[in-house]
Amino acid sequence: MDTRDAYLVDAFTDEPTCGNPAGVVPEADDLDAEQMQALANELGASETAFVTSSDEADRQLRYFTPEAEVDLCGHATIASHALLFERGVIEAGQHTMETNVGVLDISIADDGVVWMTQNDPTVTELDIDIGRVADALGIETETITAVGLPIAWTTTGLPFLAVPIEYFSDLSSLDPDFRAIESLCDDHEATGIYAFTFDTLEGDSTLHGRMFAPGAGVDEDPVTGTASGAVGAYLDRQGALDETAAMTFEQGHFLDRPGKVSVSIGAEVKVGGRAVTTLSGSIVVPESDDEEIIEA
């Protein structure tokens, strides 16, 4: 029976059962995609990261939701590297990571904070039916238009629709229509919608966000690293803030899993945070569905 060590690691927090939980399988070299998918489904986290060797970087990460493989996942990246650091597999310093969107840089501070460099951003303002967006989120159109910022398609590896919301009370009262959100994201080739307000719970935070990606099997994500980087790039491009070199995004409070993402926009887009391991054990690997080739 083939078993592997498997972990649940809460990212973007240093408190157990907060932040965004990611599955991590740190030794996945000989697992095929079907096996990874089965294990991700069994672990049940929004994403599970599988760590394998790489010819192009220090390691490769592949990410699976319970339903499908995704190209990149910020919180699972933070969780994986925090776990490897915690177990003494890797040391503080600079690392590289191969993903489906290319090789990315990772840095780990001596205190265990993990920073992930994302791809160069692309931000495109959308000529979009704001009423359709408002209906999908279950809010009034005016709560979007009052902010004075456009809805935009933004990516630093995974694309999201950035939607500004006027007040925290508006964000808290969202009544998302997940089917409508999925349709909207499909039409604009986006992973999900990141709705945000500059009203925050803590005075040192930049914004409070909520992210919906039902098409990827995640109705609402607790804390989203890739979306944070993309939205940070959007804010920088719009000139919405005086300072974008050091931002803090709140998320997850409406799911009782509060967390914080550090976002830095400079020559590169970086997201960072802490992580804590909350569950460790072993998982049984199902047999591969790959059939052996039988020669006649």
Image (cartoon, helix red, strand yellow):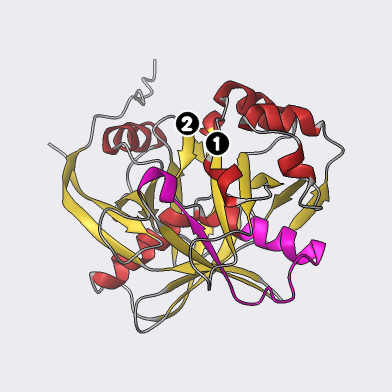
Amino acid type of disc 2? Gly
Q: Position of residue 279 (x, y in %)?
A: 19, 52
Q: Is residue 120 in view from this perspective?
A: no
Element on which disc 1 rests: strand
Q: Residue at x 43, y 29 (%)?
A: 67
Residue farthest top in this picture = 296
Q: Position of residue 8 (x, y in %)?
A: 27, 51
Q: Which label was assigned to residue 134?
A: none
> Which region of the structure is painted magenta?
229-256
Query: Quadrant of the image for the N terminus?
Result: top left
Q: Between residues 258 and 9, which one lies in front from this camera angle? A: 258
Query: Does residue 80 sit above or below 242 in this rendering?
Result: above
The residue where tag 2 is placed is: 217
Q: Is residue 54 left or right of residue 292?
A: right
Label 1: few (<14), some or many (≥20) within 10 Å?
Answer: many
The residue where tag 1 is placed is: 213
Q: Is residue 20 magenta?
A: no
Query: Quadrant of the image for the C terminus?
Result: top left
Q: Is residue 199 left or right of residue 6?
A: right
* Mark 2–mark 1 distance (CA, rounded to whole Å): 7 Å
Q: Between residues 176 and 215, which one lies in front from this camera angle? A: 176
